[in-house]
Image: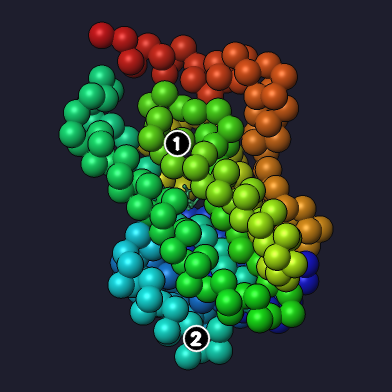
């Protein structure tokens, strides 16, 4: 699809992958609106890129979603809804059977899964009315193979991946003009995984892969190790499970 001249709404665009995407979309000649919970982060982003439009909004909050829809409509609407905001709540107790673990899982589902469906539903008619429009849902390498220490996060992304595939096909049956993309990042060097010392790619590299995929209408966009894990998970599932959960991780789970 053609990105130049499009208006793109990026949830969670105040830092990390979302902010890098905002920067690269602006460079292409798109108009970009970003959201986030923290106003200071949004102000800093606006200072760095003065043409950015920022709206404070929590992707897991129903009232915020309605208010975001109203504000974006008043601004003239969007062509692309990029669901980037996502959270991971690592269990404090790796034995996992406690209330905090369940609470974290519910929060992950609220932001990573239900929040995405809510925004897609709200914006669907607007997107359908555009000549060329798209939804981008951000899943993860962990939507293909689960991480034992991020089990509920992996499950939330896996739920989002199934929903994304179904939504794409459903919209095709309805002959709706809305393209549905899935971005599967590998480990990316952002605040979210700052405490991990494993191999990471930069947000810049990931977003370059995203833009190349969008421009080619490649609906499932795997970048870096996500490509490798896709192949291994299909033909060598045990091996790919071991790659995502190496011995150094397994040993942290032993009593
Ligand atoms: N980094 C990785 O290795 C990796 C790998 C696979 C997939 N992903 C996915 O890629 C996406 C972006 O990740 P990232 O690494 O850039 O994360 P990040 O560094 O934690 O940044 C997330 C951004 O989203 C915002 N945000 C978080 N929760 C939000 C909410 N409920 N509503 C609105 N904004 C929210 C945060 O700002 P505020 O705190 O101001 O809201 C922040 O600006 C996520 O969906 C993540 O799951 C990341």
Determine whether, in the image, residue 52 is placed left or right of residue 183.
left
Residue at numbered disc 2: 73
| Residue at image coords 68%, 16% | 236
**Local SS, label 1:** helix
Please say whether residue 17 is visible from this viewpoint. yes
Residue reaching furthest front?
174
Q: Where does residue 193 sit, x and y in percent of width and height?
A: 43, 40
- Rendering quarter of residue 200: top right
Q: Name above or below for residue 3 compared with residue 222.
A: below
Q: Where does residue 220 sit, x and y in percent of width and height?
A: 70, 48
* Local crowd size for mark 1, using a 10 Å CA cut-off: few (<14), some (14–19), many (≥20): many
Residue reaching furthest right?
216
Residue at numbered disc 1: 155
Quarter holding the N terminus is bottom right
Q: Name above or below for residue 239 compared with residue 79.
A: above
Disc 2 versus disc 1: distance between alpha carbons? 33 Å
Quarter holding the C terminus is top left
* Local crowd size for mark 2, using a 10 Å CA cut-off: few (<14), some (14–19), many (≥20): few
């Amino acid at each position: 699809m053609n990105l130049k001249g499009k208006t793109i709404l990026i949830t969670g665009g105040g830092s990390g992958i979302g902010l890098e995407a905002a920067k690269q979309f602006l460079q292409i000649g798109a108009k970009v609106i970003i959201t986030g919970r923290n106003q200071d982060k949004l102000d800093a982003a606006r200072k760095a890129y003065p043409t950015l439009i920022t709206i404070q909004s929590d992707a897991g909050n129903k009232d915020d979603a309605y208010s975001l829809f109203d504000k974006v409509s008043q601004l003239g609407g969007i062509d692309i809804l990029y669901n980037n905001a996502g959270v991971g709540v690592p269990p404090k107790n790796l034995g996992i059977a406690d209330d905090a673990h369940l609470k974290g899982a519910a929060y992950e589902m609220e932001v990573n899964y239900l929040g995405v469906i809510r925004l897609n539903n709200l914006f669907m008619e607007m997107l359908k009315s555009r000549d060329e429009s798209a939804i981008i849902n951000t899943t993860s390498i962990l939507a293909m193979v689960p991480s034992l220490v991020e089990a509920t996060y992996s499950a939330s992304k896996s739920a989002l991946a199934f929903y994304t595939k179904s939504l794409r096909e459903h919209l095709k049956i309805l002959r709706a003009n809305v393209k549905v993309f899935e971005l599967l990042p590998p480990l990316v060097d952002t605040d979210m995984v700052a405490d991990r010392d494993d191999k990471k790619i930069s947000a810049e590299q990931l977003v370059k892969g995203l833009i190349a995929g969008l421009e080619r209408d490649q609906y499932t966009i795997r970048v870096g190790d996500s490509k490798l894990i896709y192949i291994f998970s299909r033909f060598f599932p045990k091996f790919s499970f071991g790659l995502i959960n190496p011995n150094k991780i397994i040993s942290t789970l032993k009593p």
